[in-house]
Image (cartoon, helix red, strand yellow):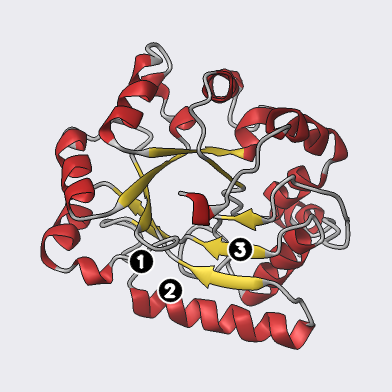
Amino acid sequence: MFSFFNKKREKEQEVDSDVTGSLSITTDIHSHILPGIDDGSPDIETSLRLVKGIYNLGIRKSIATPHVISDMFRNTPETINAALNKLKEACTNAGIDIELSAAAEYMLDDYFVTLLATDKSQLLKIHGNIILTEQSYATPTGNLNEIAFELITQGFKPIMAHPERYFYYHDDHENFYHLKDMGFLLQVNLLSLIGYYGPAVTKAAKFLFKENLVDLVGTDMHHLKHLALLQKKENQHLWQQYFEGKMYNDLSQI
């Protein structure tokens, strides 16, 4: 039986993972390419297409960062590493020579605070002591200062994922400086610069670049539609303009 949803799925599957180009970075530190454990790739076949796609765009190291959210995706090192090993094996069998590792994108909620206080060995890092965090899109984290202080004093270097996407920061850009003052590194999504999340997000992302507040960038790739946008030459040319003269995502320099 044919349906609108089947048609939509067929259209998504028209993405050509053999398209080549350049994202102007060789390491992606934020994506949702692990199969079946959050709102990213639903299965190993999709994960392979996403990995092949970013490999052909110049990515040679990808750090998958599945969500850890108390009431939605309570992933653990066990669930994350199991999905990572499955993807690694599939990439090897498919002949895709990319370095894959995994950390997590931690929502700054009560569950995270509990982990930080009682079992920080469960926290997966991007590299060294660098940890990726995020806030709710609906409301700011009420105890953000306290969490930041605890992270810093315990030796972590926290990244705030996609600060440009938090609408409650858009009316006062001093919030971005405050994040830096608290000790957060700021990571901007590539898709924010091309209008994918709307004009207000694009404006905020451009401000962050203009003020040299951006420390890292990421694809935050969840699905084939994201890959298709990353493959567009006009988008790649835009990113090259922003990245000119600066190398992003060299984690050894952070």
Q: Secondary structure at mark 1?
A: loop
Distance (Cα) linking label 2 and label 1:
9 Å
Residue depicted at 69% across the width and 49% down the height: 25
Q: Nearer the viewer, residue 75 or 113?
A: 113
Q: Which residue is mark 1?
A: 124
The disc, 3 or 1, on the residue closer to the chain's N-terminal end is: 3
Where, by quadrant of the figure, is residue 188 drawn? top right
**Mark 3 neighbour density, 10 Å: few (under 14) some (14–19) many (20 or more):** many
Tell me the quadrant of the picture where the N terminus can be found.
Answer: bottom right
The tag on residue 90 is none
Q: Residue 248: give x, y in percent of width and height.
A: 61, 44
**Mark 1 neighbour density, 10 Å: few (under 14) some (14–19) many (20 or more):** many
Q: Which residue is mark 3?
A: 62
Q: Are marks 2 and 1 in contact (CB under 8 Å)?
A: yes
Distance (Cα) linking label 2 and label 3:
14 Å
Q: Amino acid at mark 3?
A: Ser
Q: Is residue 217 above or below residue 209?
A: below
Q: Amino acid at mark 2?
A: Ile
The tag on residue 80 is 2
Q: Is residue 208 above or below residue 230?
A: above
Q: Is residue 213 visible?
A: yes
Q: Residue 216: give x, y in percent of width and height.
A: 53, 42
Q: Nearer the viewer, mark 2 or mark 1?
A: 1
